[in-house]
Amino acid sequence: MQLPPSVVCLVVLARFASGISGQISRQHEPRVETTYGLPLTVNTIYEGPVPTWNENLAVRTNGQILVTRLDSPVLELIDPAVENAVPVTVATFSSDYAGLLGITETNEDVFYVVAAAPFGSDFVKTSGNSSIFQIDMTQFAFDSATSKITGNATITKVVDMPDAGFLNGMTTIDPTAGLVFIADAYNGWVYSLDVTSGEYKIAIDDAKMKYLPSSITNLGVNGLKIRDNYLYFSNSGNPIFCRIPINTLGEPTGPSEIVADIRQVDDFVFRSDGVAFMCQNQIESLSAVSGSEVVLVAGSNTSTLLAGVTAGAFGRSEANSNILYLTTDGGLAIPVNGSVIVGGKIAWIDTEQFSGIGT
Ligand SMILES: *[C@@H]1O[C@H](CO)[C@@H](O)[C@H](O)[C@H]1NC(C)=O
Ligand SMILES: *[C@@H]1O[C@H](CO)[C@@H](O)[C@H](O)[C@H]1NC(C)=O
Ligand SMILES: *[C@@H]1O[C@H](CO)[C@@H](O)[C@H](O)[C@H]1NC(C)=O
Ligand SMILES: *[C@@H]1O[C@H](CO)[C@@H](O)[C@H](O)[C@H]1NC(C)=O
């Protein structure tokens, strides 16, 4: 039976959600702090209907936000500077794809996204190919006042990746060389891709990128970010946040190491000062990692405030470099209190008052 991707996805989500009884070893509860100006205030820019799975985001240099959807293969744009902003559709992909995941920029306004092949409840592909597409926004024009697109983005397939399991986070290794990383969460390894030639290979295959057999999800390595010649990565199915040294070609130059113990992380993002903000999708929480310390900064596992928080990105102008934009799935992965699902949202948090732990 060929269900529309959105239906398949919901079935997957329901099954994923029902697997809540599994245990993760080494569980660590983040410290709940009332100092350091916590919790931080969550401001909603837009909340979609149920179901809306906002999966990932990228901030353009002009401040507009590109949002990937996982419940349908759609790329949206929202302008947080506009009052009561509503997302507009930048691109709708073929129904050969179930949804979109990671997004990264190389040269200004040239982005790459993961388009996922249909997948089952175990995140194993059921047909087709996952692919990487280029989204060229350089000719895109949008009139915020009328919400009309007056110049389209150019969408080009870069490559099919028939051997990929479940592709997830992306990050740019070298914008000039057009080299990017793509996490394969199901297989627990990371590809490097030359976006010009379409050549790709498994660049890093590390034990810390695998999910634990006891995990409630078959997803390991998820978010990817490069900082000071290290690739940092989250793991959704192993409660560790890790890093591995790399060279400019994205090849490992030494062993991986654990940075902090933190569970059920989807994607994450660094603030310019090095504090990492971790989106704990399955426990509806946003935590910060400062050094090896973990502190809950917003949301909670009984609140819909950040239900199913998936990914974050900071503002790019001087004025909003501490503004953290977030996407959520509304609890589609794990409903709040086991049953409550709300619309996925795009939100922002001013993180400035949280300067880190012990400072
Ligand atoms: C998957 O991609 C490969 C390589 O481009 C291609 O040969 C194959 O036909 C594709 N399969 C499907 C089902 O689209
Ligand atoms: C953008 O693409 C859509 C869909 O193909 C089309 O209807 C629209 O006319 C295009 N807009 C512009 C400004 O080219
Ligand atoms: C979840 O359960 C807790 C404890 O019963 C309750 O305080 C909270 O309001 C519930 N949250 C939602 C979103 O229903
Ligand atoms: C929320 O987290 C607390 C602390 O870990 C736990 O005791 C509780 O069972 C969790 N509640 C839900 C609804 O997951």
Image: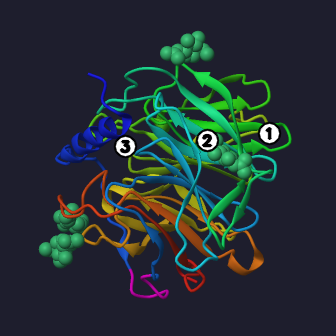
The amino acid type, in three-letter code, at marker 1 is Thr
In this view, the residue in front, 116 or 322, is 116
Any mark on residue 248, and which?
Answer: 1
In screen coordinates, is 319 left or right of 260? right
The amino acid type, in three-letter code, at marker 2 is Val
Q: For label 2, count other residues whose C-alpha is less than 10 Å away and answer few (under 14), some (14-19) or many (20+).
A: many
Figure quadrant, ligand 3: bottom left
Residue 233, image x, y percentages: 55, 47
Q: Looking at the picture, does residue 223 appear above or below residue 132?
A: below
Q: At x 78% / y 34%, what residue is drawn?
A: 249
Quarter in which the N terminus is drawn: top left
Please report the bounds of the magenta region as a residue range: 33-39
Residue 106, image x, y percentages: 77, 46
Q: Quadrant of residue 118?
A: top left
Q: For label 1, count other residues whose C-alpha is less than 10 Å away and answer few (under 14), some (14-19) or many (20+).
A: few
Q: Looking at the picture, does residue 325 appear above or below residue 118?
A: below
Residue 177, image x, y percentages: 84, 37
As for residue 153 lying within the magenta part, the answer is no
